[in-house]
Image (cartoon, helix red, strand yellow):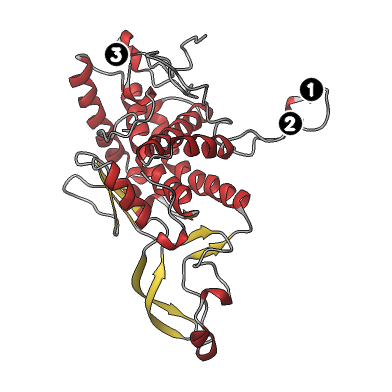
Amino acid sequence: MSAHSTRPTPVATAVGRTGPGTGPAGPAAATSLGTAFTTATGTFTGTFTAAGPAAYRRLGEVLPALRVRCAPPRSGRGWLAGADLVARPAALRELISHDARQGLARYGRPLRPDVAAGIGLHRFVWPAALLFTLPWFLERRVPLLAPGDIAVRRRTGELTVRPGAFLCLPDDPAAPGPATLPTAVLAAVPAPPPPGARAVPDEAALATGLRSALADFLTPVLDAFRPEVRRGPRTLWAMATDAVVEGLWYAGGLLGEEERARTELAALFAPGASGASEQPEPRAARPAPECAPFTPGAGFTAPASGGTERSDRCRASCCLVYTARAEAMCTGCPRVARG
């Protein structure tokens, strides 16, 4: 059984095909970053509130094997910049070769090239997606990141992320509007609110923003991996859905918030309404799932009990790891018939 199919536990493990607390922090828990930025009235030196640093710090406390630093992207000395990953096939193949070597050491036989690529995709998306989902889960903020904003160092389990614009709720202290600025500042300077924050109307809009931000980030990543993984777009998005769900589910368990993570992930990836008609609609007329291009449904099942090996989640995709070792079939694999 591969580790990514197991239930979350409050034990930090190395980041791999799985994975690899306390209550949620409010918006005020986010870190303010010192900076200088340009406005229409000149240059202002001060602070602006970013999405993520506090959430990433909490993740590091419960999962030391994954360290996230807010910094510009890095390269060299084992670092792979996200921009290189999507633009340079040689850089992507080097990342995949890392997983091919690990697979050979673990299973005692070479992985098929497409299987190694699929594992490499999962091991990239799993932590990268947490850069989006964890601030949403803990702070109700959604960073708006592109591949060029991050860098990974697989050997040491490190990521860098460059904070920038983010989505938030109207009652967030960083939300644009007069209420976000001190009265003295409003009276003295007709400057815009601190940069970065973009308020959305409500929780539903924030969830939509999270899916859109993830999709925008992952689209060039999946496009880059597709020739190596040798699977179509639907399967690639199913693989991405699995990585996104498993990452936050695992982190939620470490933070003591497993049930809330399950509930919110199920709502995040819930299918769209099926329509009022009782008659089946033609396929082309059916409404698209709200979570497209992700696979509808987070895949959670009734919690396993006793010593059962059954997973609490059925994956949307198969990692094909059984091609290296038959007994390595995941308990959460969709190929496994479960009663």
Which residue is at the far left?
A: 77
Q: Relative to 217, does residue 289 appear above or below in the rendering?
A: above
How packed is label 1: few (under 14 Cα within 10 Å), some, or many (20 or more)? few
Q: Earlier in the sequence, mark 3 or mark 1?
A: 1
Camera-side residue of 26 and 267: 26
Labels 3 and 1 touching (C-beta < 8 A): no
Q: CA distance from mark 3 to mark 1?
A: 42 Å
Which disc is residue 280 wearing? 1
Where's residue 185, x and y in %?
A: 49, 85
Q: What residue do we see at 83% from left, 24% from top?
A: 278
* Element carrying mark 1: loop
Closer to viewer: mark 3 or mark 2: 2
* Element carrying mark 3: loop
Where's residue 315, x and y in %?
A: 47, 23
Q: Which residue is mark 2?
A: 274
Q: Quadrant of residue 5?
A: top left
Q: Relative to 195, does residue 302 appear above or below in the rendering?
A: above
Q: Is residue 64 left or right of residue 306?
A: left
Camera-side residue of 74 and 305: 305
Amino acid residing under circle 1: Pro
Where's residue 91, x and y in %?
A: 27, 41
Q: Earlier in the sequence, mark 1 or mark 2?
A: 2
Q: CA distance from mark 1 to mark 2?
A: 9 Å
Q: Earlier in the sequence, mark 3 or mark 2?
A: 2
Q: Quadrant of residue 30?
A: bottom left
Q: Which residue is mark 3?
A: 324
Camera-side residue of 125 and 300: 300
Where's residue 80, x and y in %?
A: 26, 46
Q: Relative to 30, does residue 295 appear above or below in the rendering?
A: above
Q: CA distance from mark 3 to mark 2?
A: 40 Å
Q: What residue do we see at 28% from left, 39% from top?
A: 90
Q: Relative to 282, does residue 248 appear above or below in the rendering?
A: below
